[in-house]
Image (cartoon, rainbow, N blue to C red):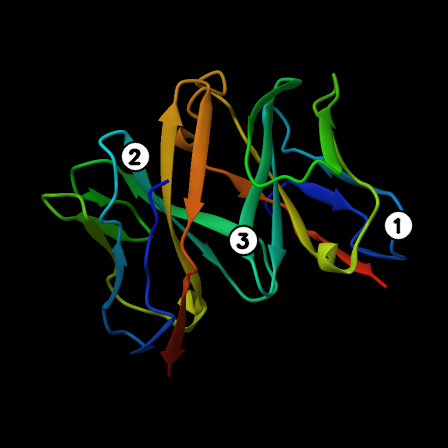
Amino acid sequence: DSGVTQTPKHLITATGQRVTLRCSPRSGDLSVYWYQQSLDQGLQFLIHYYNGEERAKGNILERFSAQQFPDLHSELNLSSLELGDSALYFCASSEGLTGGALPWWDTQYFGPGTRLTVL
Amino acid sequence: DAKTTQPNSMESNEEEPVHLPCNHSTISGTDYIHWYRQLPSQGPEYVIHGLTSNVNNRMASLAIAEDRKSSTLILHRATLRDAAVYYCILLNSGGSNYKLTFGKGTLLTVNP
C-alpha cells in the first residue's frame, strides 16, 4: 500500500459525458501527478501540481483539466469523453522537497488507479 | 525531445542477475535517467535514478555509459516478484517546466 488513494476504482460512462477522478496523496506530500495508461499509448504523464499550483503539463488533452485543493487532494476532470479515453488513470504523489522544480528528484508513490471505460 | 529505446521483453531465471538495457542516444546534458517498474495490476513504483555516475540502492544498480547514450538497470538476483514492466525514463528539467519521455518498457519474465 503506497498511501495514495484514488476513487473510484472503476468508472463506466458514455461518450460525451464528463467525469471526475479523485486522488488523495500520502500524508505530507505536496506534489501530485496524473498519468494515463492505455494499451496503445502506454504510460503517459498528464500533469503535475505542487502545493496547489500547476507545475507542468505533459500529454494532457484540452478536454482534460486538473486541480489541487488546499487540503492537497487533487481531481482530474475529463469532459466530452471519447472511446479512446478509456484507460487506467494513475495518480502519484511525492514529498516535493525541491519546491516542485525538480519533482522527479522525489520518489513518486503511485495509487492503485481508476479504470475508466467509455462506451 | 530525447527518446528512450528498450527491448520489448526479456527473460531471466530466478536467482540470476538481469541486465535491462536502455538506449537514449539523444540525451541532453540535463536529462536525468530514471527507472520505474510496474508489477501486474499495480501502479508503477520507483526503482532508481542517476545522472552520470553509477548508482546502487537496495533494489538495483544503475550503470550509465560514459557518453550517457545508454544505461543498464541491473537486478543482482532476480526473484519471481521482480516480474514486471520496467520503464526507462528521461527527465529534462527546463526550469519550472519539464518534459517527460517514457520508453515503451521492457516486460521482464522470471522463470522459477
Cα gap from disc 1 to disc 3, whole angstroms: 24 Å
Residue A46's tag is none
Q: In this figure, which residue is indicated by the disc labeled 2?
A: B31
Indicate which disc, 1 or 3, sits on the residue closer to the N terminus. Answer: 1
Residue B97 in picture, x, y percent from top left: 47, 23
Spot the residue most to the left: B66
Residue B111 figure quarter: bottom left
- Image quadrant holding the C terminus of chain B, namely bottom left
Single out the mark in the foreground, 1 or 2: 1
Nearest the viewer among A72 and B77 is A72
Residue B105 in picture, x, y percent from top left: 42, 61
Cα gap from disc 1 to disc 2, whole angstroms: 39 Å
Relative height, residue B20 to residue A77 (above, below)? below
Would residue A68 appear left or right of B81 to someone viewing this image? Answer: right
Q: In this figure, which residue is indicated by the disc labeled 3?
A: A43
Q: Which amino acid does label 1 sit on?
A: Gly
**Residue located 42% across and 44% down the image:** B101
Relative height, residue B74 to residue B101 (above, below)? below
Q: Do labels 1 and 3 share a chain?
A: yes
Residue B14 in picture, x, y percent from top left: 32, 77
**Residue located 70% across and 35% down the image:** A62
Element at badge 3? strand
Residue A49 figure quarter: top right
Q: Residues within 10 Å of mark 1 (few under 14, many from 20)?
A: few
C-beta proximity under 8 Å, tags 1 and 3: no
Specify the subunit that label 3 lies on: A
Q: In this figure, which residue is indicated by the disc labeled 1?
A: A16
Q: Residues within 10 Å of mark 3 (few under 14, many from 20)?
A: many
C-beta proximity under 8 Å, tags 2 and 3: no
Element at badge 2? strand
Quick check: can you spot residue A108? Answer: yes
